[in-house]
Each structure stands twice: as C-alpha cells, then as structure tokens.
Image (spheres, rainbow, N blue to C red):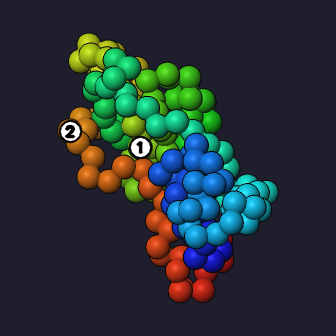
Amino acid sequence: MDKYDRMLLAALLENGRATYAQLARQVNLSAPAVAERVAKLEASGVITGYAAKVDLEKIGLPIQCVIELRLASHGTQQAYDALTRIPQLTECHRVTGDPCVIMQAAVASMNELEALINQVSQLGFTKTSIILSSAVERRVPLDHLEGNGRKP
C-alpha cells in the first residue's frame, strides 16, 4: 500500500459512494487509475465491502450501551451462538482480560435495556455502561502504515 492507496481508503471511508471521478480529483490521479487501484484493493481483500452509516437515534434507538460479559461457563460456543441471536447487539467481541465478551447494543427504551441486560445476564456476570457521546467513531488508523515498513 502506498500513499495513494491510503488516500483512496480515507476518501472511501468518508464517502463510500464517491465516483471514480470524485476520488480521482481528491487524490490527484486519473479516474481509470483510481478504478484500477480500487479494484486491486477489493481483489486483495483490503476493501471487504461498502456500508451505510446509520444514526441509531433517528431510527428510534436512542440508548446505546457497552455491555461486558464474564461467561459463567467460559468460552462455550453455545453462549456465543446465543449472543448472535440477540438483535439489539450491534457488535460483539470475544476479548482477553476479565470480561470474556464486550458488546455494544442499541435499544429504544430503558425497559428494553433492562430486558436485554436480563437476557444477557443468563449467560454470566454483566457490567453495562450507557454511551453518552463518542469522541472517536469507528475509524481505520491509516496513518500508522506510513513509513513503518508494514505491508498489510
């Protein structure tokens, strides 16, 4: 990955619907060169897909939280399968450390949050934190790739 690939990724992360002509203007390359580079990034698996960003509050899910879970029976596939069936969970990560799993969830009301916590608590001990605001939204740290010899 060179600086143009990083610039293209940054531009696509900002606007995944940008045309090749728009991207070309942003990175100072021709549209065909941009199309070729994007195709290579897709073929190599660097770009795995395109998605819309959704404001959860505007679709009726104003309460977002982080739930830590220490599983009662450590690491059972049944527990992970049960978590995948909970629609309010927007992310679910198996992690090292005290909690076994860290999840993010979005719900419409405090009653729904209470029911979600009760459901997840059947799998073990939970700790829930309400998200008040986000200083950093999900992002890709492209700058760390520059000049360190790493090749993703």
Q: Is residue 76 visible?
A: no
What is the tally of numbered marks visible in this picture? 2
Residue at left 23%, top 42%?
133
Say what secondary structure mark 2 lies in. loop
Give 152 or 17, whichever is nearer the viewer: 17
Image quarter hosting the N terminus:
bottom right
Provide the residue designation for mark 1: 102
Residue at left 45%, top 46%?
100
Q: Is residue 139 visible?
A: yes
| Residue 94, horizontal then vertical, whole percent | 51, 47
Provide the residue designation for mark 2: 132
Name the amino acid, label 2: Leu
Residue 17 higher or lower than 142, as above or below: above
Residue 66 higher or lower than 96, as above or below: above
Residue 64 higher or lower than 49, as above or below: above
Query: Gap between marks 1 and 2, in whole Å?
Result: 17 Å
| Residue 43, horizontal then vertical, whole percent | 79, 57
Say what secondary structure mark 1 lies in. strand
| Residue 2, horizontal then vertical, whole percent | 63, 77
Residue at left 50%, top 68%?
142
Q: Residue furthest left?
A: 132
Judged left or right of residue 63, residue 18 is: right
Q: Earlier in the sequence, mark 1 or mark 2?
A: 1
| Residue 48, horizontal then vertical, whole percent | 67, 50
Name the amino acid, label 1: Ile
Res 126 quadrant in image: top left
